[in-house]
């Protein structure tokens, strides 16, 4: 097949299992990552996402299943023989080596000529926007968190790995720096064509950066899809709740559905409900100010609905107060049935 | 009481001195003062029946440069260096294994310090029972007909070395363990993911990062080995005299306090020189190419 090469996924997990004693850490996980893709594994702590990444890196051996890299099995290989590079959560910079020697570490193991090592170290540091002349001879101890992060990135990227693994690399940075690094990582992924496998517990980060997201819970993958797919059309109540605020309730059809707060709107009782919308009557129990938006908590019988108040409502001077009787309305298209419920 | 406490809390310097005072006084009385007295003695005349006579002379120092004493100094340095080397070779793997022993760590550390529960003297006598002509080793070898007559094991440099290494091994294991235990396992994983095989990972990451422990352990072994007198006395006998024995003899049967003091001071100068070199070279070797 002439297209064979392009169809081979960069990374393929096939029914991979891993247990530690009695605990099942990863339970029959399968997924493909396409070449050049920015692929995130999202889940709360203990869901098995880090173990999944560590099996890909070679620090853990799967008990069952296969791991393929560009079509070749790698799960039997020790870490140092896998053509991968990893950025660690704690950065794991060598404290006894200068920044330049940290970045050179992998190249030195490959016994490249000194001149080539020096040149590649310089360009790797420039790639992560650290001036080699300024930072090259410094100790990692003298760097800020963000700078350490960049060195860790340069140390991995200098090897030009086909696949880069990142284990919650932005966890220790403050919000502003995180946003910057998110954009830079995304840009590096596009420019270099390197496949990124990114582990995070931060759903906002996963949605903002990824081409596709695998949502993990309790050692299994709940759903894999583009950020829009997993957010707009979550397959399970867990995915719906983990990726953001969600109204999960029984629709008129009798099926359990999910509707995002921003897909709902409030109307005054008695005003005409536009054609084709589903609606429920309720009462505003609380208003939650979230900075960039505001949510109304609407009691509909025994359940609470979370409804995002839209800007037009506010511009038009529509003020909602606690205790107001309201009608909650949504398009049936925006109510997505959940699996297994 | 309350007011006093508040006053103390407000006066940092008074508090700091208060905390330091007992230790300072103790060291002044029982370390600085005796050393000063010894320093004075080392430059005085020898008394006929021990003690010192007034006067100033550096004869005791000059006397130390006799080939007889230089040989003792040489043997002392050699035995102390060899003891340190053996403690590194034996102790490092032990510390490494304990640091990686997971939940057995504390039990194993307990075993390392267990010998301190009995007196060093008792333990050294036990080694004598092991090594003497009719000891366990010779009896076993004779019984197996591997030898016809007992080997001379006791009162040899080897016996002294065995005793010193045995005695000071924990002082190597503990600091090396402490530095290995602090090592972030992610560092080794990072090395491996960058292509370092386990041997390279050890040489490039583990070993350099445990160097502070190795330096501390080496000092803790080398310095007391230099001054050892019990072990060479019991296991080395009259033929394996080290500086410690020389000093002891001068204050005892030799009745030459000035010479004993001078030998002590030469030993002390030696220790200071070694510490200086170790700490400067050792520390200088740590951060590679770092500004």
Image: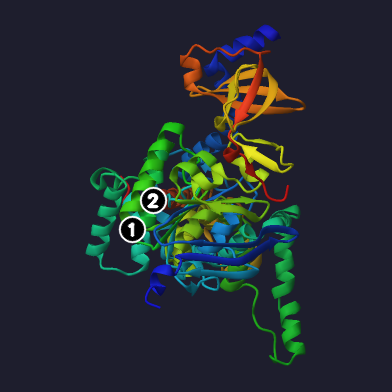
Whether residue B212 is visible here, answered yes or no, is: no
Q: Residue furthest top?
A: B3
Q: Is residue B115 above or below residue A282?
A: below
Q: Are marks 1 and 2 on the same chain?
A: yes
As rendered, which of A102 and A337 lies closer to the eye? Answer: A337
Secondary structure beneath dot 2 equals helix
What numbered label is drawn on residue A158? 1
**Percent position (x, y) of residue B180?**
55, 55
| Residue under the image location 49 percent in, 43 percent down | A207
| Residue under the image location 32 percent in, 56 percent down | A192
**Percent position (x, y) of residue B224?**
56, 54
Which chain does the numbered disc 2 sit on?
Answer: A
* Label 2 sits on residue: A153
| Residue under the image location 62 percent in, 41 percent down | A240
Q: Quadrant of residue B5?
A: top right
Position of A256 with respect to A116 (left or right) is right
Neighbours of disc 1 within 10 Å: few (<14), some (14-19), many (20+): many
Whether residue B106 is visible here, answered yes or no, is: yes
As rendered, which of B97 and B35 lies closer to the eye? Answer: B97
Q: Quadrant of residue A51?
A: bottom right
As rendered, which of B85 and A336 lies closer to the eye? Answer: A336
């Amino acid at each position: 097949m002439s297209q064979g090469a392009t169809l081979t996924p960069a990374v393929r997990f096939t029914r991979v299992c891993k247990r530690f004693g009695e605990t099942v850490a990863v339970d029959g996980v399968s997924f493909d990552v396409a070449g050049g893709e920015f692929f995130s594994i999202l889940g709360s702590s203990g869901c098995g996402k880090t173990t999944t990444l560590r099996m890909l890196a070679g620090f853990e051996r799967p008990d069952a299943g296969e791991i393929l890299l560009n079509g070749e099995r790698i799960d039997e290989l020790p870490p140092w023989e896998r053509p991968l590079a990893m950025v660690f959560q704690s950065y794991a910079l060598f404290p006894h080596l200068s920044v330049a020697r940290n970045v050179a570490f992998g190249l030195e193991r490959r016994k490249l000529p000194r001149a080539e090592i020096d040149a590649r170290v310089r360009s790797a540091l420039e790639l992560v926007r650290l001036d080699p002349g300024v930072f090259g001879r410094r100790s990692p101890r003298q760097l800020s968190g963000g700078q350490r992060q960049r060195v860790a990135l340069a140390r991995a990227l200098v090897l030009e790995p086909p696949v880069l693994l990142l284990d919650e690399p932005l966890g220790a940075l403050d919000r502003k720096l995180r946003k910057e690094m998110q954009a830079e990582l995304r840009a590096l992924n596009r420019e270099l064509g390197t496949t990124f496998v990114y582990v995070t517990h931060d759903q906002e980060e996963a949605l903002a950066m990824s081409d596709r997201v695998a949502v993990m819970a309790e050692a299994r993958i709940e759903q894999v899809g583009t950020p829009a797919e997993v957010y707009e059309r979550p397959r399970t109540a867990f995915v719906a709740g983990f990726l953001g605020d969600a109204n999960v309730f029984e629709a008129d059809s009798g099926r359990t559905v999910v509707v995002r707060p921003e897909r709902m709107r409030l109307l005054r009782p008695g005003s005409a409900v536009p054609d084709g919308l589903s609606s429920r009557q309720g009462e505003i129990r609380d208003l939650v100010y979230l900075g960039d938006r505001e949510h109304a908590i609407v009691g509909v019988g025994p359940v609470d609905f979370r409804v995002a108040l839209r800007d037009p409502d506010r511009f038009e001077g529509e003020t909602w107060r606690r205790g107001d009787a309201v009608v909650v309305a949504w398009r049936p298209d925006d109510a997505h049935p959940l699996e297994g419920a | 009481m309350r007011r006093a406490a508040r006053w103390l809390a407000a006066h940092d310097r008074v508090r700091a001195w208060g905390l330091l005072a007992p230790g300072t006084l103790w060291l002044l009385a029982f370390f600085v003062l005796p050393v000063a007295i010894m320093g004075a003695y080392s430059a005085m005349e020898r008394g006929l029946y021990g003690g010192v006579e007034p006067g100033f002379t550096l004869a005791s120092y000059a006397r130390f440069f006799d080939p007889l004493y230089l040989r003792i100094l040489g043997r002392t340095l050699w035995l102390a260096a060899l003891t340190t080397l053996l403690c590194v070779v034996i102790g490092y793997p032990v510390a490494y294994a304990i640091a990686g022993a997971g939940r057995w760590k504390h039990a194993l550390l307990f075993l390392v310090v267990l010998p301190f529960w009995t007196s060093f003297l008792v333990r050294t006598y036990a080694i004598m029972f092991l090594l003497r002509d009719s000891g366990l080793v010779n009896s076993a070898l004779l019984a197996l007909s591997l030898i016809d007559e007992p080997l001379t094991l006791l009162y040899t440099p080897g016996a002294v070395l065995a005793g010193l290494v045995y005695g000071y091994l924990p002082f190597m294991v503990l600091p090396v363990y402490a530095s290995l235990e602090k090592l972030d396992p992610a560092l080794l994983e990072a090395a491996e993911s960058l292509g370092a095989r386990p041997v390279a990972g050890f040489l490039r990451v583990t070993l350099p990062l445990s160097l502070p422990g190795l330096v501390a352990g080496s000092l803790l072994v080398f310095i007391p080995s230099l001054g050892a007198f019990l072990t060479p006395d019991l296991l080395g006998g009259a033929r394996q005299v080290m500086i410690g024995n020389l000093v002891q003899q001068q204050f005892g049967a030799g009745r030459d306090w000035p010479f004993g003091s001078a030998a002590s001071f030469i030993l002390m100068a030696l220790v200071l020189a070694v510490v200086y070199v170790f700490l400067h070279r050792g520390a200088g070797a740590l951060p590679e190419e770092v500004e």
